[in-house]
Amino acid sequence: MAAAMAMYAHVSWAQAPAAPESVTALPTEEEPSSDAKAAVDAELFYELLVGEMTTGQGDAASGYALMLDAARRSGQEQLYQRATQIALQSRSAESALIAAHAWKDAFPNSRDANRYLLQILVILNRIDDTSGLLKQELALSNQRVKLLTLKALPQIYGRVSDKALAAKVVETAVSGELDNPSTGPTAWTTIGRMRLAADDTAGALEAAKKAMALDATDEGAGTLALQLVDVGAPGAQYLLKTYLAGRPSPEVRMNYARFLLQDRRTEEAREQLTLLTESNPELADAWLVRASLDIQGKRPDDAKVALQHYITLSEPKADNPSVAKALSRAYLMAAQIETDSDNFPKAQEWLTKADKVAPGDFSVSVQQASLLAKQGDLPKARALIQSLPAGNNEELQRKLLADAQVLKESKQFAEAVTVVGKAAALTPNDNDLVYEQAMLAEKANNLPEMERLLRKIIDRQPDYYHARNALGYSLADRGVQLEEAKTHIDAALTFAPEDPFILDSKGWVEFRLGNKQEAAQIFEKVFTQQQDAEIAAHYGEVLWSMGQQDKAREVWRKGRQSDPHNETLVETLKRLGVRL
């Protein structure tokens, strides 16, 4: 009723403008008398009221018809819009289309009518009919709105069934913007995104190139190049590197670093994060991710510097719950660094800070237990974890895994296998937990149990490539069942062809089979990507066996820089009698 009264007031004022005071408004043949106007207004008010009431009572079809009739008789744009909205609310796209067409016919230059009609046609998959409307929308828009509209088009057309047709229609509609230096990069990026959605990777790459030819610093073009890298488009990597070599947006560089991390290219990810933190030192999240990589890469001093930057930037915002959660994680990372270097009082300081910003956090308690175990009090550490509440199986499983982690850190591998087995029993189909149990069994030197668990995973899930790689590597490392080992590793590579650790397994099994040259080629490729200590141990041994002692020593030195205490590297040097 309120809506109807508001519309009625609008209509009445529009139909009866105030006459100047010096002129007496007299009825004419063209203009109805005031009594006639009152009758029309009263009738219109009644129709609006009934339309809104029937809509509110669930009869949207009748409400829509009454509202559209009122719009046609009054000539008021607001009523056309309301009729269209009622039809959309009732999920009647065809009725909405009729109302929007009537609205557009009555007000050809109305941008609202144009937008409604455009989006309704998209909903109805009538893509061919949208080109002219889209052209008009762009023509009526100022520069800022035009750019926003162009960026929104892939989302607007995102649910259409014929995405290739949508890409062609949009390209035709925006053709007038493609050579414009101010709108061309965005227009080409939009075309590229829509081509990519239509699985036209080559076309998307061509569009990205044209966008960057107009503006090599365009963020949208950089983002599109990264999307093309993600789908493996040939040439996309070069295009992205060209963009990153200029003045890239921090978001694109950060997203590229995340992509590299997902692809296990940690050194390249760290390089991108280093560039990002140097150019944008105010970006707290980049410092935190960089610190995490430094910890993973055994660079505690670099990790401390990165964490301090993150903490300095984040502590003033600790009243924000999401910031407080991340800050707690940073404190825990700092505590872990101090724990690993046996600086227990400093580690406790960081844990106290973590508990302050995230009181009762499970991770803080686990880290506290880890600190106790590191100091030699394993019973107290386990008692702390076991005292934590567990109201359901999920929480109980989390406790068991935390207990296993403390046991693992204390090198109590056999007991850790048992505890993880209890956790796995709570979710019998969880292959990740069975895999963890297998890796602990290997640490406990229970190789038959490790093999049994890995084969169990492979039988249940043949594409679980981590299990295939682990089994293949274990067999190769022991020099047994080498052909089977190679079969498992090759199968793993079909799922993750660029994984450096699976390639390491591949090189190792080829070496064990006597294919030294092929092994060396594999290791040379993988070591340029990932200078991991274990990979260095294997690569160096292959080179050593081929008489390339100087090069082997160089590889081992690089591996030792990444992790001086790596067990495989230490054992290899000892077995071969090599001193670096």
Image (cartoon, rainbow, N blue to C red):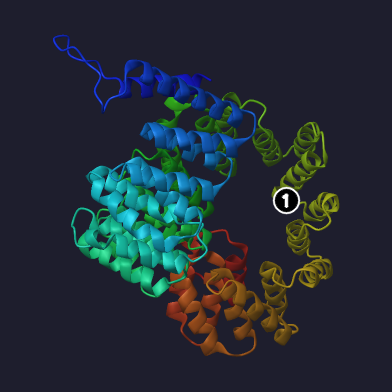
**Percent position of residue 371, x then y:** 66, 37
Is residue 580 in view from this perspective? no
Secondary structure of residue under mark 1 = helix
Residue positioned most to the front: 29
Amino acid type for the residue under numbered disc 1? Lys
Residue positioned most to the left: 22
Classify residue 32 as left or right of residue 442.
left
Is residue 160 in view from this perspective? yes
State the image quarter where residue 131 is shown.
Answer: bottom left
**Percent position of residue 223, x then y:** 37, 57
Residue at 70% across, 76% down:
472
Q: Nearer the viewer, residue 194 or 576?
A: 194
Callout 1 crowding tier (Cα within 10 Å): few <14, some 14–19, many ≥20: some
Using the image, determine if residue 120 lies above or below residue 470: above
Classify residue 404 as left or right of residue 542.
right
Residue at 77% across, 32% down:
388
Residue positioned most to the top: 21
Q: Nearer the viewer, residue 408 or 472?
A: 472
Q: How many marks?
A: 1
**Percent position of residue 181, x then y:** 18, 57
Using the image, determine if residue 492 lies above or below residue 274: below
Classify residue 283 as left or right of residue 412.
left
Classify residue 434 as left or right of residue 345.
right
Q: Nearer the viewer, residue 244 or 41?
A: 41
Q: Nearer the viewer, residue 349 or 4?
A: 4
**Percent position of residue 404, x then y:** 76, 48
Using the image, determine if residue 36 lies above or below residue 503: above
Residue labelled with disc 1: 408
Residue at 67% across, 67% down:
466
Residue at 61% across, 73% down:
495
